[in-house]
Image (tube, rainbow, N blue to C red):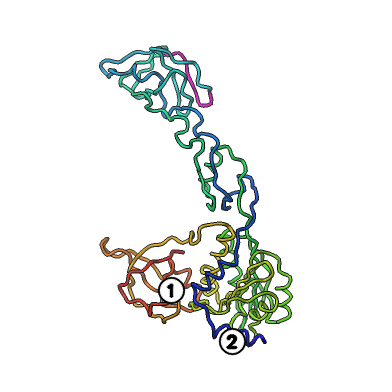
Amino acid sequence: MTDHDIRMRGFEERTDMEAALALLRSLVGLLETETVRLEEALGRTLAGDIVSEVQVPSFDKSAMDGFALRGAETFGASPTDPIAFSVVGEVLPGDPGEPEVGPGEAVRIMTGAAIPRGADAVLMAEHATDEGETVLAHAAVVPGRNVAPAGEDIAIGDTVLEAGRVLRPQDLGVLASIRRVEVAVIRRPVVGILTTGNEVVEPGSAEAGEPGKVVNSCRYLLEGMVAQAGGEANWLGTLPDDREAIRAALGAFHGDLLLTTGATSTGKEDYLPGLLAELGELLVHGVNIRPASPLAFGRLGDALAVLLPGNPVAAMVGFDTFVRPALQLMLGQPEGRRNRRVRGRLNRKVASALNRTDFVRVRVREKETETEGVAVDPIRTGGSGILTSVTGADGFIIVHRDDEGLEAGAEVEVFLY
C-alpha cells in the first residue's frame, strides 16, 4: 500500500474521538520509579502513598508566649482577684522543656517551645503580670488551652500524600516535616519533538520573515506543554519534506513518546502516516474533531508516536486531547487533572456538525449582576493557524459529536487554560 493509499484510507475511516482515546489509553503503561532528593522533587509525580512514621509536632508545644502551668489552678482568677504562681524557669524554642512544673508553679515560655512536664496549659502573656519570680494570672485557662499537642498535625500512620500527586512547594514542606530527605517518583517521560516542513524556520534565523517561510512556533509551544505535563522534552530538529530524511529520523528515535508536527494530512508531501505504518504501527489516522482532525498515532517500537497537525492551534488541541492523557497515564496521574473549570452561558450561537467534536476557544467574563452569572463569548477568529486566538482566550468549550451546535444562552462548561 502506498503512502497515498494510507493517507486516504485514514481519512475515509476517520475515528470518533472517544474511540481514539480508548485505543490510545490501551497503548500506554506506567513508567518506572526513581528516587530523588527532596530539593529535586518539585513538580514530580509521587510513585506511592506517603505514610508518616512520625508525629508532627513530635512534642507538646506552646502556641503562645506566656506561662506554662496547671490550668485547673487558674480557675477563679480575674483582673480583680489574680492568682499568684512562682516562676521556676524559662523555656525557649529548642530547649528540652525543663524544669518540671509543680503545684503553684509556672514556667515562662515562648511560642513553639516544648511544654514542660507537669504543665497542661499556657496562660497568655496578655492575661498575666510578670513580677520576675512571681506571675499573677488575671484569667482562667482550661487544661489544653494554647497547647499544640504532639501529633496535632500528623499522626503516626497518617497518609499525608497519595500516589499520583504532582508535588507542590507545600507538599515538599510536609515531606520535610516528617523527616523525608528522599522521595520515590515516577520517571519523567522522554518526549521527542520533531518538526517537518520546507517552509519552517527558527525565529532567530535569517530566513524568518521571508515570503513563504513560517516561524516554528509549534516547537516552543510543545516544549512548554511537555514540561507543564511533567515530561522531558527533547528537541529533534526540523526536517524538510523529504521522505528518506524523515524515515531516518523516525528509525533513530529513542524515547517514550514521539511528537511530530506537519506532514500528517493527505497532501503529496505528507509522509508521516505512511512512514509510521512502515516502521511501526499506524493505528489511527484522522479523528472527528476540529481543529486537529489530521491527527494520527500508533506505535514506533516501544514508543507511542503522535503525529500532530502543523498549525499551532491544532497542535495545541491535539496535545491537550491526546498527548496530555498519555503522559498522565505514563506518570500515574488522574486523567484530566490539569484543567480548572467554570460554568457559564453562551453569549452567542456556536455552529457545529453532527458526528464531530469541536473545541471552541472562548473568553469568560462576569455579567453585570451577580444573578446573571458568567458570560461565555466564543472567539470569532477560529482558524487553527491563528495562535493569538489562544493567547486571547480564557479556555475552551467542547461541542460534542451529538450536538449540531449550541444556541445562545446554553449553559456550557469552560475548560480554563
Q: Is residue 109 magenta?
A: no
- Amino acid type at mark 2: Met
Q: Position of residue 191 (x, y in %)?
A: 64, 64
Q: Residue 379 or 117: which is nearer the viewer?
A: 117
Image mark for residue 8: 2
Q: Nearer the viewer, mark 2 or mark 1?
A: 2
Image mark for residue 57: none
Q: Earlier in the sequence, mark 2 or mark 1?
A: 2
Q: Position of residue 11 (x, y in %)?
A: 55, 84
Disc 1 residue crowd, few under 14, some 14–19, many 20+, Cα 10 Å: many
Image mark for residue 360: 1
Q: Secondary structure at mark 2?
A: helix
Identify which residue is drawn at 48% across, 37% down: 154
Disc 2 residue crowd, few under 14, some 14–19, many 20+, Cα 10 Å: some
Identify which residue is drawn at 45% across, 22% down: 109
Q: Is residue 150 above or below residue 167?
A: above
Report the span colored magenta.
87-95
Q: Position of residue 321 (x, y in %)?
A: 51, 69
Task: Please indicate whether residue 354 sits to the left or right of residue 283 in the image.
Answer: left
Q: Secondary structure at mark 1?
A: strand
Asked if marks 2 and 1 touch (Cβ < 8 Å), the reply is: no
Q: Position of residue 278 (x, y in %)?
A: 69, 79
Identify which residue is drawn at 49% across, 16% down: 99
Q: Is residue 86 above or below residue 292?
A: above
